[in-house]
Amino acid sequence: MLSHLSIKNYATVESLEIEFQPGMTVITGETGAGKSIILGAMGFTLGDRADKTIVRPGASRADIVAEFSISDIKSAQSWLADHDLTLESDPHQCLLRRVVNRDGRSRGYINGSPVTLTDLKDLGDMLMDIHSQHEHHSLLQRATHQRLLDDFGVDQQLRNNLLSTWKQWQTNHQKLTAIKDQTSASSGQAQLLAYQLSEIEELDVQDDEVEQLDAEFKALSHADDTLNVVHGALEECEGDEQSLANQISQITQRLRSLKSNAEALGPAIALMEAAEIQLSEAVNELRRFGGDFQADPERLDTVNRRLGALHDLARKHKVPASELGQLIMDLKDQLSRFENSDAELEQLQANDGLLREQYQKLATDVSKQRRRAAKKLDTAVNSELKHLGMPHAELSVTLTAGTGNAPSQHGLETVEFLVSTNPGQAANSLIKVASGGELSRISLAIQVITAQTSETPSLVFDEVDVGIGGGVAKVVGEMLRQLGRTTQILCVTHQAQVAGQGHHHFYVSKSAQSESTVTSVLPLVGEQIVKEIARMLAGEELSNESLAHAQQLVANLN
């Protein structure tokens, strides 16, 4: 329900803070006082389009905040959770805010987070429904007809099972369609993959082969230079008197011959002796390498051709030669998916048939309950319409079979409320037949009947008593009060018989202040309510008779 409304610099409102309560709240006041401004502000927070003319003259922007309690509105709680907009401090509260600047640009917020106009509208439809002679008519939408009928007479668990099955079918259908689209082009692609794979496998690429061949190619390419360097090193290390081995040996012998400093030179002599040993070992290694290593032009040519083939293949597939092994695994994986697609397609087709069968059974059960509920609903609504001054009106709840073979999330048919308001007139869509006042009363009758079974948001009725007499107005008031027992009702009215039924009462007035007009809202209690109802009955000049009549209207509620 709507618990608080804050309006700043909106039209003739400078600043208003209004606290709302459960039950039926009536809003009265002189014609032109600004009652419609309050409803306009509500609609604005629910996603109505912005208009720069709504900004109060002299102000930079209009700012409206509506606070709702959603503890009993499960759909709104789920929507907020799905959009990550739940108010962490109190998940059962919801704040809608709308700001419009003087240039007409507006911003919307839900629980402090910026949102789109569509988001405001989607959530707003779950929180409040404004029934008026203007544009906010959920009753003109077929989706509303379906929801009202299903809430009225179709088992909730059955509907949940139907929706769950439809979602499973839709998911399976999307996969099935994707596989079919893939299969239509997969034959040629599979052949290409098989050819590419066989071409690579013919080369018998080994792990790390490219790196090993690169190293061998570099070594073979410089074989002559390597052997020349090795042989030269051997000649310098040993052989004639000037070789390194002879020079180190002679130096070591001369150091040993020095007797006077033998102890001090001991470390140097030890190092020279070690150098002799290491040089000898190095010479042995060079001889071994020189004996084993040979220039091999044929092997070099083989390695070169092998590397060329590997690099050519890598360039063809636009991968580094070192990643040919990974390419083989990727191609095998792709080919395996194509080869397994037939089995997957067969499984998805089997699932499609099974889910369609389950859906058909559930949808048939829903249809049976809908047909029974439609008869009960139009009979009950037509009975209420007669009490509302529409004795010739007839509402018909029609079910129209859907077209096409694909399952629909709502079942096998669509629901629409058709109405005839005059004798002999064929039933037609509400928007084509009902006037603004008639639509409000039809809506009221439907809401009264369905209120006990549906998750009804706050309802706003704007002058539902237009064009009716006092007797019918009293019935309208009684019905609104009855509806207010289970849901919040906000009612703008000019009829004293309706206003007298309210649980709560607000009086709207306007006054001139500093060359501007200001709208204000005053909550009425006790004798204030009696005087306002008396004014509605007889005008500004209150008489004893009008006060007594007003007192009687209020007293009859006790």
Image (cartoon, rainbow, N blue to C red):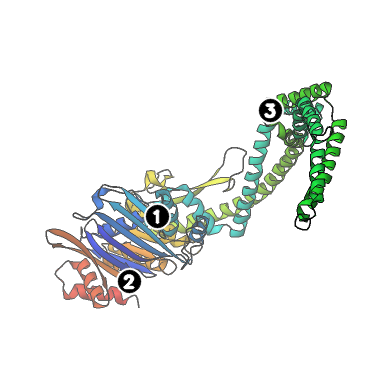
Screen quadrant of the C terminus: bottom left
Screen quadrant of the N terminus: bottom left
Query: Where is mark 2, residue-wise?
Result: 504
Q: As shown in the figure, which amino acid type bears the numbered disc 2?
A: His
Crowding at label 3, few (<14), some or many (≥20) Cα neighbours within 10 Å? few
Q: Which labelled disc corresponds to residue 317?
A: 3
Residue shown at the point (39%, 49%) measured from the top left: 117
Q: As shown in the figure, which amino acid type bears the numbered disc 3?
A: His
Q: Position of residue 302 (x, y in %)?
A: 81, 23
Q: Is residue 532 above or below residue 217?
A: below
Q: Left or right of 217: which side holds 32? A: left
In space, the residues marked 2 and 3 are separated at their CA atoms by 79 Å
Give yes or no for contact between labels 2 and 1 (Cβ–Cβ under 8 Å): no
Instruction: Give whichever of 175, 89 is nearer the camera.
Output: 89
Q: Earlier in the sequence, mark 2 or mark 3?
A: 3
Q: Left or right of 479: which side holds 165? A: right
Q: As shown in the figure, which amino acid type bears the numbered disc 1?
A: Ile
